Amino acid sequence: MNLTVWLLSLPAATAASPLTLDTVLASVDRHAPKLAALDAKVTEAEAKALAARGAFDPTLKSKVRDYSGPYDRFQADTALSMQSGFGPSVTAGYRIGAGAFPTYAGAYETLDLGEVRVEVATPLLADLGMTAERAKRLVSDHHATAARSLRDDGRQQLYGKAATTYWKWVAAGEKLALSMELLALAEARQTGLEQQVAEGALPPLEAIDNQRVVWSRRADVATAEQVVTESAVALSLFLRDDRMEPLVPDVSALPTGTPGPSSRPTNDTDLIPRALAARPDLVAFDALLDAATVDLQRARSTLLPDVDGMVGWSQDRSTIPDDKGTKPEVVVGMDLKVPLALRKGRGELARSRAAIDRLAAERRWLVDQITAEVRALIQARALALTRWEHASAAVSHAREVAHLETRALELGASDIFKVTKREETLAKERKAEIDARAEVARIDALLQTATASWSAPGV
């Protein structure tokens, strides 16, 4: 089914009061599928960050073995370990081994009260200060920040699109009202003209020409209704019910008496720094750069030799006094692992540096793009405002001329053709004023998006 036909089949959003922009933005905030998708991405990124923190959760391990056969024996071992993000790890445990042990399993035998132990292990070069687990956690945190910023940016973009679509719908409604007003004038005039023609006061040409105007203006109304319908369908993508189904706003919901645009001054000295400070997509780039910097630090550590040191303490416990086996035992050790070619480390280092360079270049391009966009919108707004002021003045003069021409017709000093042309000229100027006002509103919406100035509805 054609998308437009499907949308037109949806229920119309009728309301006792005119539909406001705040209502549309509130609908975007609550029911836009795009925002729901971005919210899901944030949840996904935050879940990954939570999972990465799990590497530092205390871990309890326990195992029990009971052997029957030539060597009846029992073994149990429980240990609690904790890994820090900076490298050192601590393990505390207790084990007991009782019964008859073969020679090859003698290490599992303990005194009757078992053995307690504590062990501290730490990397001495590679991984010291930036373990793989800590790097993963930091990267996932930065990615979650980026996801939240991209969600905020998506909301700003949707607000801007909703606003520009709303003002287009409002302008279409105003043009429809104007077309209907012109039609009503011609239809009201037709009755009087036909009466005057019947009385012989006017030639039939006058009534025939006005009837032509009536049919022409009816066609204009139909065209204006089509434009309103199309703009309402476009607006329904942002106006939704609680089930996220689009609502096509009814003509009765169109606002009346739309105020003129604000003539507030705008300049890049104020707006450009504000945009660069507030844009969520820039914040997202900064978070991604932070994540890439963590990757770089981790890559540098992998070039170092993998040297691990450990210190352990253990002591068997017994009910037998002065058992020599109850004396504590201390162990100190070191493990060494050196990859000779270092290809993995060198590759990771090159990749992370390239990622930082790429993100920095993309961020610089975005900064330049934002600066150019805001500057162009500031200039466009000034021109659009001037255009609206000129169009408003033209409407005032055209209205005065149309009034004088109508008065001349009443006095018999004019004809239907001249009056019609004056009315059409006035209509043309009023449509130009509507377009100019809508253009200022559109640019204002784009400026708010470019400077990330949209606030949540009602705030």
Image (cartoon, helix red, strand yellow):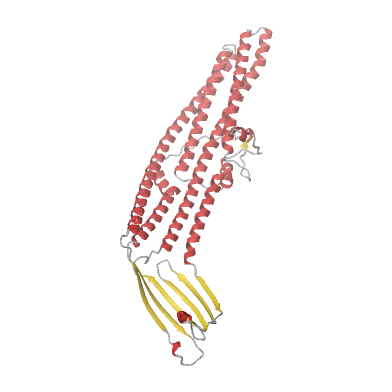
Which of the pair 19/291 is nearer the observer? Answer: 291
- Decide if residue 386 is on the left or right side of residue 336: right
- Decide if residue 195 is on the left or right side of residue 149: right
Residue sticking out furthest to the front: 70
* Whole-percent x, y for residue 112 in the image: 52, 86
* Whole-percent x, y for residue 65 in the image: 54, 76
Q: Residue at x 63, y 43 (%)?
A: 241
| Quarter of the view holding residue 12 | top right
How many numbered discs sit on the rendered protein? 0
Q: Residue at x 45, y 32 (%)?
A: 384
Q: Where is 424 relative to 4, above or below? A: above
Q: Quarter of the image containing the N terminus?
A: top right
Q: Where is 214 relative to 115, above or below? A: above
Q: Residue at x 49, y 55 (%)?
A: 45
Residue sticking out furthest to the left: 340
* Whole-percent x, y for residue 226 in the image: 59, 28
Which of the pair 323/28 is nearer the observer? Answer: 323
* Whole-percent x, y for residue 234 in the image: 56, 35
Which of the pair 135/258 is nearer the observer? Answer: 135
- Decide if residue 238 is on the left or right side of residue 306: right
Can residue 232 be seen in the rendering of this structure? no
| Quarter of the view holding residue 373 | top left
Can residue 5 be seen in the rendering of this structure? yes
| Quarter of the view holding residue 336 | bottom left
